[in-house]
Image (cartoon, rainbow, N blue to C red):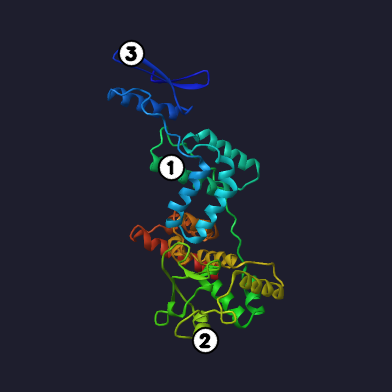
Amino acid sequence: MAIRKFKGSWWVDVRVDYVRYRKRSPENSKAGAEAYEALVRQRLARGEPIEGRRPSNGPLFRDFAWTWFNDYAVPNNKFSEQRAKRGVLRTHLIPYFGRLPVGLITTHHVDQFKAAQIRGGASSSSIRNRLTILRKCLVSAHEWMTLDGSLPKVHLPRASSIRTDYLSADECDALLQASNGLPHELILIALRTGMRQGEIKGLQWSSIDWQNRSVAVQHSHCDVRKILDTPKSGRLRHIPLDTDVMTLLHRRKKANGYVFLNGGQPFSNKTINLLLTAVCKKAGIRRTTWHVMRHTFATNVAMRGVPLQVVQHLLGHSSVKTTERYAHVAPSMLRVAIDLLNPRHQDFGQPVGNQWSAAMFDTENNKAA
């Protein structure tokens, strides 16, 4: 047997040329012992001593973490992502792993950290985010420094179901009726396009395609650096504009510059949030946020049977998995799928796509009736 567990420790036990070699695994786990066994066999095959060079444990995590942040996170992540990673490192990861050499962090250490986070009341999504940053940091350490031993496994907690908050039709109407002028325009464009708050603040007149009645979402205003940045996903997307939005934009059309300004300057997060809070109070509805209006837009288009891939493009999600949170609001699509199994709906002379369209048409007619 090449590896075995003895009195709580994993050992490598191999024979080469009738000589038996027994060594304790540097990482006390089955996976670590298997990796160490492969290393021992390679050294013996090359005629090298088993110990070889002294294993490199690398720098302390608290030192390497900032090296990784400056050399990996800063060049590859947007400013908002950098700020989030910096906060996770400073508040959670460095206080827990800081005194450990990066090469000695094991799977058990990671699981202990996860258990401590759960006991502390952290949400599943927060823990997943922190562990994802830790995993990337440790992967970089092993890639950059060729550390001995195996990379620890990071077991992410199961994602909890996300409840998506959105406004009812009555709440949307109340907001629009209680607002006028610039607040009304901001709320209308948020409800009809699903743009993020930063994208609305950074919207430029040059991004409006008047001929095709659409907007190219390519900017987002960054409050901290006071600059125009790229959208969160980093990719350009186009959103068609309805008649109401086109009318309000055409009424105040300009050649270039910001579409929405507050006293000649771009809106700040604080100012635009206070504006929405005041409208909510005037309308007599619960306090809401600009992101809830983005959820409202996505929920409304999903409820009308728009495919999730189309919703994904409209929202600018990098993965359709993020968009799947809106799948449950379209139960009529599930009903159509089940109705297609009924012999009355089966028409083997038509392609499946036509049968689906016909079933959808029948469903809509029944609702209208």
Taking the view exactly as shown, the residue that stands out farthest to the bottom is 251
Write down the quadrant of residue 216 in the picture: bottom left
User: What's under tag 3, amino acid-wise?
Assistant: Val
- Quadrant in which the C terminus appears: bottom right
- Quadrant in which the N terminus appears: top left
Residue at image coords 59%, 79%: 262
User: What's under tag 2, amino acid-wise?
Assistant: Arg
* Label annotation for residue 141: 1
Is there CB contact under 8 Å for labels 1 and 2?
Answer: no
Residue at numbered disc 2: 252
Report crowding for label 1: few under 14, some 14 to 19, many 20 or more residues within 10 A (C-alpha): many
State the CA–CA distance, disc 1 to disc 2: 54 Å
- Residue in front for this viewpoint, 267 or 48: 48
Image location of residue 311, percent across then percent down: 47, 64
Decide if residue 270 is in sight here: yes
The earlier-in-sequence mark between 1 and 2 is: 1
Compared to residue 15, the image places residue 363 above or below, namely below
Compared to residue 319, the image places residue 194 above or below, namely below
Q: Is residue 329 left or right of residue 25?
A: right
Is there CB contact under 8 Å for labels 1 and 3?
Answer: no
Write down the quadrant of residue 299 in the picture: bottom right
Compared to residue 35, the image places residue 13 above or below, namely above
Residue at image coords 39%, 42%: 143
Residue at image coords 44%, 25%: 25
- Helix, strand or loop at mark 2: loop
Residue at numbered disc 3: 19
